[in-house]
Amino acid sequence: MKRVNVFMLGIVLMMSIFSVQPQADAAVKMFNEPPFSHYKVSRGDTFWFIAQRYGLDYRELMRLNPDVVPTNMQVGEVIRLKPEASHHSAFEDQVVSLVNQERRQRGLQPLQHRADLKNVAHKKAEDLINANYFSHNSPNYGSPFDMLRTFGISYRSAGENIAKGQTTPEQVMRDWMNSPGHRQNILKPEYNAIGVGFYHGAWVQMFIQTN
């Protein structure tokens, strides 16, 4: 049931993205400088077009987003427009802080953000984008449990939350907390460690109860 809920969440997000696409003949508003720090890529976007629209040098935009392939920008991925904009690692840490905030409010122990678990979650987020799927079962790594074992992480119990299309840690946490299955993972008392991954608009939380 949890996978159905996650998949349905993905469908809603994709529908919301498509519903806000401008018409081909609509005028594009131009800016002298970016009015925000991050930008969600739309269909047909390029670094040059985004730079022109927001009064930036496209070479600086590419420097700010070294992990984005200019010839293969993904619709829905989030890029930085300003040097002070949070990098993906900062987004991941912010999600952990929000998770632990929710847990503390309910008298639960905070989760440790383990580096090895964070690495696996980030690789799963990359896989969601690069292999173009939205599922707990990866065509490359198998189930989340298979993936954890592949990377040498032992556990007594484990869980995973995924999402796609949200632009901020606050937004993705709000969506997860509003979904019973995702909220159950976030607030499960038995879990004591977490890894969070964010890549081009894909978000992954991996939870474990250590042995």
Image (spheres, rainbow, N blue to C red):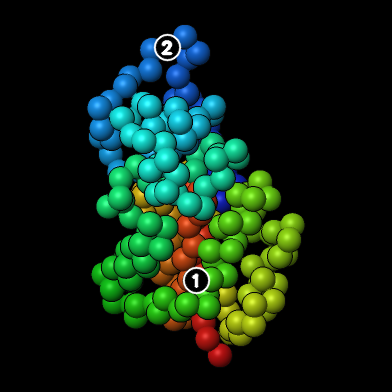
Task: Tell me if 120 is positioned left or right of 83 in this view.
Answer: right
User: For the view shown, which residue lies furthest in the top direction?
Assistant: 25
- Residue at numbered disc 1: 118
Q: In which quarter of the image is the C terminus?
A: bottom right
In front here: 119 or 52? 52
Where disc 2 sits, the SS reads: loop
The residue at 42%/58% (across/down) is: 88
The answer to whether 22 is drawn above or below residue 138 in the figure is above
Q: In which quarter of the image is the N terminus?
A: bottom right
Rendered view: 59 above or below 111: above
On the rendered structure, is 8 left or right of 39? Answer: right
Q: Which amino acid does label 1 sit on?
A: Lys
Q: Where is residue 175 in the image (x, y as percent from the top left)?
A: 41, 50
Residue 70: tell me if it is visible: yes
Q: Residue 161, position in %: x, y?
A: 52, 60
**Can the viewer see residue 3?**
no
Of the residues shown, which amino acid type is indicated by label 2? Ala
Closer to the N terminus: mark 1 or mark 2? 2
> Which residue was labeled with disc 2?
26
Q: Residue at the bottom extreme?
A: 211
Question: In the depicted view, which residue is nearer to us: 94 or 41?
Answer: 41
Q: Is residue 149 left or right of residue 112?
A: right
Where, by quadrant of the figure, is residue 138 drawn? Answer: bottom right
Relative image position of residue 176 (x, y in whole percent) = 43, 54
Question: Distance of mark 1 from mark 2, alpha carbons?
Answer: 42 Å
Number of marks? 2
Q: Of helix, strand and loop, which one carries label 1?
A: helix
Neighbours of disc 2 within 10 Å: few (<14), some (14-19), many (20+): few
Residue at 54% x, 27% y: name it.
44
